[in-house]
Image: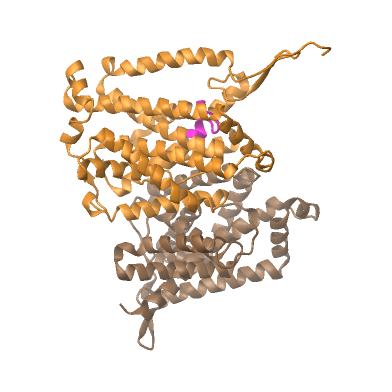
Chain colours: A orange, B brown
C-alpha cells in the first residue's frame, strides 16, 4: 500500500434497499390513508394480515435469529389479551391503556418463563414453552371474574369510548363501530411497522452482530466475549412484549375472549410458524412474503375447514425439506436482492465490489 | 379422599404416561430428535386399532398384534423418507417438520373421522376389577402398568444385550465413527423409529380403551410424555417410568382435591422438578 491510506467502510446499504426504503415509505402512507378509500371488510382483512405479520416478525426474531424455537407464543398472546380484558372490564381503563398493560404483563411473564425454559436446550425448549402456555391457560381459566373456562365479552360501550374513536368518528364521519375498526387498524399498522423496524434496528446494531455470531458459532462468539445467554434473554423478552401487545390489540377488535381461543396453539403459533417458514426463516422480508401467501391460501381454501390446515402443514414440511430458506430466500439467492439488508459489506479499498 | 386409593391410581396412570414416553425417549436417546408429532401418532395408532376392532370384529389385543407391525412400517417410512433428511447440527428442520406433521395428522384425522370422541371397546375388561384389601383396582389400569414395565424391560434388554442395541448405542455416541465400523446410521435410525412406533401402538391401545379420544388430543399426550422423560432424566428408561409415575400421582392428587386442578397439578409438579433437579432424577445422557 506504499504510504497511501486505503479507506474501508462497513455498510449494510444496497441499491435495492435504498429504493425499497422509498417504496416502503409510500406503502406506509397509503396504509395510513387506507380507511378513506377501502371498505370496512378489506380493512378487517388488513387488520388480520398486519397483526399476523407482527406476530410472525417477533417469532422470526426468536427462532430465526436467536435459535429459540418457541411453540408457546400463545402464552403471551393469551395473557396480553386477558390482562387487557381485566384492565377494561375490572379496572375500567381505556382499552388503549389496557393494551399497553397487556404488553407489559406479557413481558413480565417472560421473566419467570424464561428462567424456566432456558434450562431446557434446543428441542426441549420448544416443548417447555408449550408447557408454560398450558399452565397460563389453565390458571387463567380459573379467573372467575373474567368468565373462567367459558370466557367473557368486552362491553361494546367500552371500545366505543376508546381514545381516538370519537375523534375519528367526528373527523371522518364513520359510524362508531366502524371508527373502532379504523383505530384498531391504525394500531395494527403501527405495531407491524414498529415490529419490523425494531427487528431491523436490532439486527443492524452491535447486538445484532453478536446474535449472528452466536447463531453461526456459539463457542467462537463466546470466546470473543459475546454473552449469548443475556442476548437470548433480551430477544425473548422483546418478542414477548410485542406478542403481548398484538394479542391485546387482536382481542380489542374481537371483543370476545375464552381461554381456549386466546391460548390456541394453532391460531397463534402454528399459523405464525408456517408464515415464517414458507416466507423464509431468518430474513426480515420472509414473514412479509409469508403472510401474503398465508392470507391468499386462507381465502382460497376457507371453505374446506381442516383441509386448509393440512395443506398449510404440508407446504410447511415441503418448504422445510426442500427449500429451507423459504420463498424469499429462494428469490434472494437467485437475484441477490435484499430489501432490508442486515449483512455488513466491506466497501472501498483496493477491492472492487 | 382415600389417600391409598388416590396414590395407587396415580401410580397406575403413570404406567400409561411411561408408555406414551418410552418411544419418545428411545428416539431422542439415539438421534437427539424430538418428534413433536409423537402425540398425534399415538392418536393415529388408536384410530388404526379402532378400525381393526370395528371392521374385522377383533379383540383389541389381537388388533394390537396387527397394528404393531403396521406402525413399525409407518415409523420406518417416516424416518427413511422424511426425518433422516432433517437430521444435522441445526435443530430447526426436525422441529418444524415434525410440528407440520402434527398439524397434518390432526387435521387429516379430523377430516376422516370427524371431531366425535371415540372409544375402543374392550368387552368385559372395561369394568373388570380386582380387590386388594379394601382397594378395588381396575384390570385395565393394572394391565397398562405391567405393559409399561414389560416394554421397558424389553427395550433395556434390546439396548444392552443385542447386536442391534449395540448399533443403537454406537450411533448415539458417534454416528460417523459408527458408520466407519459398518453401521449405516440412517438404517439404524429407521429401525429405532419403527420400534418407537410399535411402542406407540401399545400406548394407543390403552389410551383408546381406557378413555375417549378424538383427533385433537395428541398434543396434550406429547406434553405428558415429554414431562415424564424430562422428570425421569434423559436417557434412562426406568427414569421415564418414575417420571410418568410422578406425573400420574400429581394429576390424581390434584384432581382429588379439585377436578379443575388435575392437569395443572401435573404441570406444576413438572416445573418444580425442573427447578430443583434440572436434569431429572436419573440422568444418563450428557446433553
Q: Relative to the observer, which residue lies in front, A124 or A221?
A: A221
Compared with residue B3, is residue B22 higher up or lower down, i.e. above or below? above
Left of A76 or right of it: where is B180?
Answer: right
Q: Position of residue A349 (x, y in %)?
A: 73, 14
Residue A47 part of the magenta-drawn span: no
Horizontally, is B37 left or right of B9 in the view? Answer: right
Measured from the top left, where is residue A168 in percent x and y? 21, 21
The answer to whether residue B98 of the structure is visible from this angle is: yes
Looking at the magenta stretch, what is its main secondary structure? Answer: helix
Q: Is residue A48 left or right of residue B202?
A: left
Q: Could you say which is closer to the camera, residue B274 or residue B147?
A: B274
Q: Is residue A33 above or below residue A223?
A: above
| Count of numbered labels shown in the rendering | 0
In the image, residue A280 lies in the stretch drawn in magenta? yes
Residue A271 in the image: state x and y as whole percent: 42, 38
For the C terminus of chain B, which image quadrant?
Answer: bottom right
| Residue at 50% across, 67% down | B243
Q: Residue furthest top?
A: A4
Q: Residue at x 59, y 61 (%)?
A: B234
In the image shown, does B91 or B269 lie closer to the viewer? B269
Give the quarter of the image for residue A104. top left
Which region shows up in magenta? A276-288
Position of residue A175 measured from the top left corner of the image (x, y, whole percent): 16, 23
Amino acid at each position: 500500500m506504499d504510504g497511501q491510506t486505503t479507506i474501508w467502510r462497513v455498510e449494510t446499504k444496497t441499491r435495492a434497499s435504498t429504493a425499497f426504503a422509498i417504496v416502503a415509505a409510500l406503502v406506509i402512507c397509503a396504509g395510513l390513508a387506507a380507511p378513506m378509500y377501502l371498505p370496512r371488510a378489506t380493512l378487517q382483512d388488513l387488520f388480520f394480515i398486519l397483526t399476523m405479520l407482527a406476530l410472525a416478525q417477533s417469532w422470526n426474531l426468536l427462532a430465526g435469529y436467536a435459535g429459540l424455537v418457541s411453540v408457546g407464543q400463545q402464552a403471551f398472546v393469551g395473557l396480553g389479551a386477558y390482562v387487557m380484558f381485566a384492565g377494561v372490564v375490572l379496572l375500567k381503563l381505556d382499552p388503549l391503556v389496557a393494551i399497553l398493560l397487556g404488553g407489559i404483563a406479557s413481558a413480565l411473564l417472560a421473566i419467570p418463563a424464561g428462567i424456566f425454559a432456558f434450562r431446557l436446550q434446543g428441542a426441549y425448549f420448544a416443548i417447555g414453552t408449550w408447557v408454560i402456555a398450558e399452565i397460563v391457560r389453565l390458571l387463567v381459566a380459573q379467573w372467575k371474574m373474567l368468565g373462567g373456562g367459558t370466557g367473557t365479552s368486552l362491553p361494546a360501550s367500552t371500545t366505543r369510548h376508546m381514545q381516538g374513536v370519537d375523534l375519528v368518528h367526528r373527523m371522518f364521519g364513520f359510524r362508531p363501530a366502524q371508527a373502532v375498526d379504523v383505530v384498531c387498524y391504525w394500531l395494527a399498522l403501527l405495531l407491524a411497522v414498529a415490529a419490523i423496524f425494531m427487528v431491523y434496528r436490532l439486527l443492524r446494531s452491535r447486538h445484532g452482530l453478536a446474535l449472528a455470531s452466536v447463531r453461526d458459532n456459539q463457542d467462537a462468539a463466546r470466546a470473543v466475549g459475546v454473552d449469548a445467554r443475556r442476548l437470548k434473554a433480551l430477544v425473548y423478552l422483546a418478542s414477548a412484549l410485542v406478542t403481548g401487545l398484538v394479542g391485546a390489540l387482536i382481542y380489542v377488535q374481537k371483543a370476545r375472549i375464552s381461554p381456549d381461543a386466546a391460548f390456541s396453539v394453532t391460531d397463534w403459533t402454528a399459523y405464525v410458524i408456517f408464515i415464517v417458514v414458507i416466507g423464509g426463516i431468518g430474513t426480515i422480508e420472509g414473514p412479509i412474503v409469508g403472510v401474503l401467501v398465508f392470507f391468499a391460501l386462507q381465502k382460497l381454501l376457507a371453505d374446506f375447514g381442516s383441509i386448509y390446515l393440512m395443506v398449510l402443514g404440508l407446504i410447511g414440511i415441503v418448504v422445510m425439506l426442500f427449500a429451507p430458506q423459504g420463498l424469499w430466500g429462494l428469490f434472494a439467492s437467485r437475484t441477490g436482492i435484499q430489501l432490508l439488508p442486515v449483512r455488513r459489506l466491506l466497501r472501498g479499498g483496493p477491492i472492487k465490489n | 379422599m382415600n389417600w391409598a386409593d388416590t396414590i395407587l391410581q396415580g401410580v397406575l396412570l403413570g404406567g400409561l404416561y411411561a408408555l406414551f414416553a418410552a418411544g419418545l425417549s428411545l428416539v431422542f436417546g439415539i438421534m437427539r430428535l424430538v418428534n413433536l408429532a409423537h402425540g398425534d401418532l399415538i392418536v393415529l395408532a388408536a384410530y388404526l386399532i379402532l378400525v381393526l376392532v370395528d371392521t374385522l370384529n377383533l379383540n383389541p389385543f389381537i388388533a394390537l398384534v396387527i397394528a404393531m407391525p403396521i406402525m413399525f412400517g409407518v415409523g420406518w417410512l417416516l424416518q427413511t423418507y422424511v426425518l433422516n433428511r432433517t437430521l444435522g447440527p441445526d435443530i430447526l428442520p426436525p422441529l418444524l417438520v415434525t410440528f407440520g406433521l402434527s398439524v397434518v395428522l390432526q387435521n387429516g384425522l379430523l377430516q376422516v373421522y370427524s371431531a366425535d370422541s371415540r372409544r375402543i371397546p374392550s368387552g368385559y375388561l372395561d369394568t373388570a376389577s380386582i380387590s386388594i384389601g379394601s382397594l378395588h383396582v381396575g384390570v385395565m389400569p393394572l394391565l397398562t402398568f405391567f405393559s409399561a414395565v414389560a416394554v421397558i424391560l424389553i427395550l433395556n434388554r434390546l439396548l444392552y444385550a443385542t447386536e442391534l442395541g449395540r448399533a443403537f448405542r454406537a450411533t448415539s455416541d458417534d454416528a460417523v465413527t459408527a458408520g466407519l465400523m459398518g453401521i449405516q446410521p440412517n438404517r439404524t435410525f429407521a429401525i429405532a423409529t419403527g420400534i418407537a412406533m410399535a411402542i406407540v401402538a401399545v400406548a394407543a391401545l390403552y389410551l383408546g380403551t381406557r378413555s375417549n379420544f378424538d383427533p385433537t388430543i395428541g398434543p396434550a399426550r406429547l406434553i405428558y410424555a415429554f414431562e415424564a422423560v424430562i422428570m425421569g432424566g434423559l436417557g434412562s428408561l426406568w427414569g421415564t417410568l418414575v417420571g410418568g409415575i410422578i406425573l400420574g400421582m400429581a394429576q390424581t392428587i390434584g384432581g382429588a382435591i379439585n377436578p379443575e386442578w388435575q392437569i395443572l397439578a401435573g404441570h406444576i409438579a413438572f416445573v418444580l422438578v425442573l427447578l430443583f433437579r434440572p436434569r431429572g432424577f436419573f440422568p444418563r445422557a450428557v446433553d
